[in-house]
Image (spheres, rainbow, N blue to C red):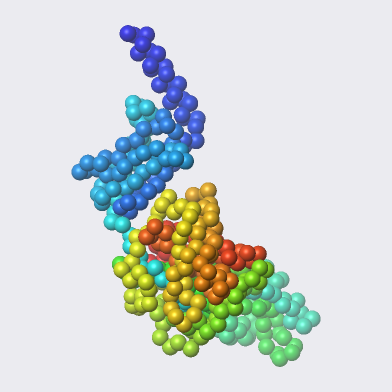
């Protein structure tokens, strides 16, 4: 009997040592101390078959665990409640305990409305440097680069190009606070006198506002927040993400659709700049969309009662639909399919590949056009994400972002 126990102990020790060197154990150790899931949400934990797990709540089982087809453990959250997720080796050697919370399922009202976004930048964005006649650009000589955001001059916050010019009008050396790739820098610059008009200038082209057309992705009836576009508003010349000073969201009446064709993506155009009343306030512009607060619930939506949010693991290849506006008839729902999903678990604006299959949309727009970014994607009765980009060489296809990525990006702004 003693030899039997010794052999078992040796086998467990060997298995533990082998697992300690495996990436599957790393997946367990990298889990957060607490996991928060929506009711019904599904997530896959990439552990080996030697790792056992139990999900126990205060009132019984809080989640269902089963082997996933792709390997690992598939965790499906049950009803709301608190509990713990315990991992062990072969059900014998304890590995890790994680707090598990299941919250009510998130419900959003999907959009599809064409919207206009108008905003001023928080500071002015340098889009290029320019010599003043025979005088080299003072900005370039000081080290200021294209893409930099000038936020302050001599401690005074800059709200636009006119204010920047006024702060430099005396020609004195000025101290500029500049934001570059998220890092705050300071430069001393002496403006040069432009011989053409006698004005003192920095020798830089700057931009202080932008406007464009996109599509509303969702409205959150609980918070009043919205998300749109699924990607950032960036400067057209430099590609730099534009910071938000003040911004507003407007209803856009589509006045024309230029259909896409291979090598030439089309676009939606409209007249939102004529609208006096804004739909809401834009508070954030980031890699995964434009976010803010709406002044009223959405109108003109086929899903006024909302749809539940899909987790990343609930999205699959196959049939889906998208909501978008391509004419005066309002939001339409059109058939599409999810062709491919990214293997990476990291957030991305191109997490899935989409193909438009609906003949109505193909006839009207040729597929995906500029201005459709943000069009919500629906699958299995859930909102799964949004269209973000068109494939230029084949406009019937494009990319999409997962809805959870947008919600995670919106959280700091909310």
Q: Nearer the viewer, residue 314 or 108?
A: 314
Q: Residue at x 47, y 68 (%)?
A: 334
Q: Residue at x 38, y 77 (%)?
A: 300
**Residue 151 can be seen, yes or no:** no
Within the image, what quadrant is residue 216 found in?
A: bottom left
Horizontal and vertical percent for residue 82? 26, 47
**Residue at the extreme bottom:** 197
Residue 380 against residue 135 in the figure, above or below:
above
Q: Nearer the viewer, residue 166 or 350?
A: 350
Q: Residue at x 35, y 51 (%)?
A: 41
Within the image, what quadrant is residue 219 found in?
A: bottom left
**Left or right, residue 37 beside residue 197:** left
**Left or right, residue 102 beside residue 414:** left
Residue 385 against residue 58 in the figure, above or below:
below
Horizontal and vertical percent for residue 275? 45, 87
For the C terminus, give its image quadrant: bottom left
Residue 245 against residue 406 in the figure, above or below:
below
For the N terminus, give its image quadrant: top left
Q: Residue at x 37, y 8 (%)?
A: 3
Horizontal and vertical percent for residue 83? 27, 44
**Residue at the extreme left:** 59
**Residue 135 can be seen, yes or no:** yes
């Amino acid at each position: 009997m003693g030899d039997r126990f010794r052999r078992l102990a040796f086998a467990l020790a060997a298995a533990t040592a082998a697992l300690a060197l495996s990436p599957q154990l790393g997946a367990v150790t990298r889990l957060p101390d607490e996991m928060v899931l929506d009711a019904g949400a599904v997530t896959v934990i990439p552990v080996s078959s030697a790792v056992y797990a139990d999900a126990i709540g205060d009132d019984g089982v809080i989640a269902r665990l089963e082997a996933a087809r792709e390997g690992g453990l598939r965790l499906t959250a049950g009803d709301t409640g608190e509990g713990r997720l315990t991992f062990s080796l072969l059900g014998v050697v304890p590995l890790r305990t994680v707090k598990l919370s299941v919250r009510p399922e998130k419900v959003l009202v999907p959009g599809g409305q064409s919207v206009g976004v108008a905003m001023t930048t928080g500071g002015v964005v340098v889009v290029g440097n320019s010599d003043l006649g025979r005088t080299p650009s003072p900005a370039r000589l000081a080290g200021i680069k294209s893409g930099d955001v000038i936020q302050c001059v001599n401690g005074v916050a800059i709200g636009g190009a006119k204010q920047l010019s006024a702060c430099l009008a005396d020609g004195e050396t000025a101290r500029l606070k500049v934001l570059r790739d998220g890092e705050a820098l300071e430069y001393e610059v002496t403006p040069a006198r432009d011989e053409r008009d006698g004005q003192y200038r920095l020798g830089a082209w700057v931009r202080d506002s932008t406007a464009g057309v996109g599509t509303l992705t969702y409205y959150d009836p609980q918070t009043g927040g919205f998300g749109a576009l699924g990607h950032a508003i960036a400067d057209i010349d430099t590609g730099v993400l534009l910071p938000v000073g003040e911004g507003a969201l407007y209803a856009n009446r589509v006045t024309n659709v230029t259909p896409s064709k291979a090598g030439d993506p089309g676009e939606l155009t409209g007249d939102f700049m004529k609208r006096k009343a804004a739909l809401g306030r834009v508070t954030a512009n980031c890699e995964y969309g434009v976010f803010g607060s709406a002044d009223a619930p959405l109108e003109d939506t086929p899903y006024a009662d909302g749809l539940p949010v899909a987790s990343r693991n609930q999205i699959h290849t196959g049939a889906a639909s998208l909501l978008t506006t391509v004419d005066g008839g309002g939001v339409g729902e059109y058939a599409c399919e999810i062709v491919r999903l990214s293997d990476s678990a990291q957030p991305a604006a191109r997490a899935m590949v989409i193909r438009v299959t609906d003949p109505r949309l193909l006839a009207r727009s040729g597929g995906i056009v500029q201005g459709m970014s943000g069009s919500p994607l629906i699958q299995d009765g859930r909102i799964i994400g949004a269209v973000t980009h068109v494939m230029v060489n084949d406009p019937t296809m494009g990319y999409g972002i997962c809805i959870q990525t947008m919600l995670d990006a919106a959280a700091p702004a909310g």
